[in-house]
Amino acid sequence: MNPPIKNDQELKTALERLDALWSVEPSDPAWNERESLSERISAYEDAHHEIPPPDPVDAIRFRMEQQGLRQKDLVPFIGPESRVSEILNRKRKLTKRMIASLHEGLGIPLSSLHGLPPAPTRRWAGATVTCIGGVKRTETQGAPSTAATSTYGQNCRNQAA
């Protein structure tokens, strides 16, 4: 097992090495090094470089840009154009109804609309585990011809990172 990354200089070195290994194929012996390095980098960044929660207005503007929407296109989700303008100019906060409508209608993640950090995700043995609202969701990917399967399970609020 490789030692954990201890400081930003080691992180920089690890990122440079990962960049060099980025194009290796799973059949290449360097694949295991790439995977191990990725996990070590991720662990260090999770512990030392916190990502601030997204701003709800920025999340809405990003989705507008992605889908080529204008302010008037948000009327069905937020209300009259004047209210859309107030939200986008940060003069009014989103209501629960607006948040639910934007999430359902435009697919903006609830955590982004609430200004919360993304749910923690852990990977092992081909599975991704995400804790959302204190409920563990596990996804596993089958053979390329099969779809991913999901299961919801036990409480995970107090799990260590």
Image (tube, helix red, strand yellow):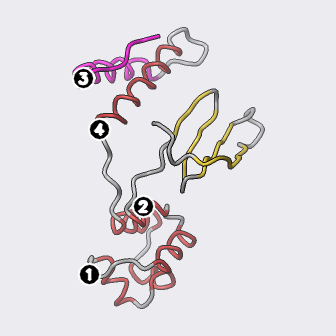
Crowding around mark 3 (Cα neighbors within 10 Å: few <14, some 14 to 19, many 20+) is few
> Depth check: 72 or 98 in front?
98
Q: Magenta residues?
A: 1-22
Q: Name which residue type carries label 4.
A: His
Q: Name which residue type carries label 1.
A: Lys
Q: Which residue is mark 2?
A: 112
Left or right side of 130 for 75: left
Crowding around mark 2 (Cα neighbors within 10 Å: few <14, some 14 to 19, many 20+) is many
CA gap, disc 2 and disc 1 = 18 Å
CA gap, disc 4 and disc 3 = 11 Å
Q: Which residue is mark 1?
A: 91
Crowding around mark 1 (Cα neighbors within 10 Å: few <14, some 14 to 19, many 20+) is few
Q: Which residue is mark 4?
A: 49
SS state under label 3 = loop
Farthest-out residue, front = 158
Crowding around mark 4 (Cα neighbors within 10 Å: few <14, some 14 to 19, many 20+) is few
Left or right side of 7 for 21: right
- The mark lying in front, picked from 3 and 1, is 3
Query: Is label 2 in contact with label 1 (beta carbons under 8 Å)?
Result: no
Q: Name which residue type carries label 2.
A: Ser
- Closer to the chain start, of discs 4 and 2, is 4
For the point 34% across and 33% down, the residue is: 45
- Above or below 83: residue 123: above
- Closer to the chain start, of discs 1 and 4, is 4
